[in-house]
Amino acid sequence: MACILESDLSTESCSMSIGGLKGVWLANKADIDSTTSPSQGIVSAVTMVSPETFFVMGTEKDKSSFTQIFTPIGNTGFVVQTLDLFLNPEYISGNITATALALGEFVAIVETLKGEKFIMGRGNSLRSTVVDFNSGVATGDIRNLHVTMVANELEFIPKYTGTIPLV
């Protein structure tokens, strides 16, 4: 997504931080054949290596988020894309383990509470920097898997307008 400097110095067009994600889908980076980008800041399709698909991640309501931070280096720079997930292990599709999340390289499609979708890690992959599991023994104790993934990219997080390849 292009970050446009407005006359009032607003950063609304940058979407620097979005919290309370409605949905998150992860795919192994190696399972993505190509992406289609009709214009800068937009990805309209993802083609998977057959028969691979994205995995549905069961996020806990209003806890997961993503951010992007531009880091200038001379006349250029890079964008640090961070995806912070709080997952309910009972609602993760497929056979994804905490170890797989810790060691894998991923591309994510995230959906905001407003219904906008974005694609992250498309160039250099999202890699986990934190994976921890919280669990208690009482009925009301919180049980979740917390995963933080980071990618250093050359672009701001683009919007995703296509269909998510699922089983």
Image (cartoon, grey):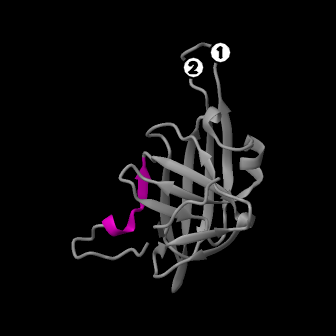
| 111 relative to 13 in the view: left or right | right
Res. 141 image quadrant: top right
Is 23 displayed left or right of 32 in the figure?
left
Q: Which residue is mark 1?
A: 137
Residue 104 lies, with reference to residue 61, above or below; the image says: below
- At label 1, the amino acid type is Val
- Residue beneath the point at 34% across and 69% down: 13
Of residues 88 and 153, the one nearer the viewer is 88
On the image, the x and y values in percent for residue 135 come to 65, 25
Residue furthest bottom as drawn: 75
Magenta segment range? 11-19
Nearest the viewer among 32 and 12 is 32
Foreground residue among 19 and 79: 19
Q: Whole-Å distance between the Cαs marked 2 and 1?
A: 7 Å
Question: Is the Cβ of the residue at disc 2 closer than 8 Å to that at disc 1?
Answer: yes
Q: Judge whether residue 11 can be spotted in this image.
A: no
Most extreme residue toward the left is: 8
Residue 87 locus on image (x, y percent): 59, 39
**Extreme-top residue of the structure:** 138
> Mark 2, residues whose alpha carbon is within 10 Å: few (<14), some, or many (≥20)?
few
43 left or right, relative to 103: left
User: Where does the image place residue 165, in percent across and percent down from the top left?
Assistant: 60, 60
Q: Is residue 15 magenta?
A: yes
Instruction: Identify whether 69 is placed above or below 102.
Output: below
**63 inside magenta stretch:** no
Q: Residue at x 75, y 41 (%)?
A: 97
Q: Position of residue 113 (x, y in %)?
A: 39, 49
Q: In the rendered image, which residue does mark 2 sit on? A: 141
Helix, strand or loop at label 2? It is: loop
**Number of labelled discs?**
2
Mark 1 is surrounded, within 10 Å at the Cα level, by few (under 14), some (14 to 19) or many (20 or more) other residues, namely few
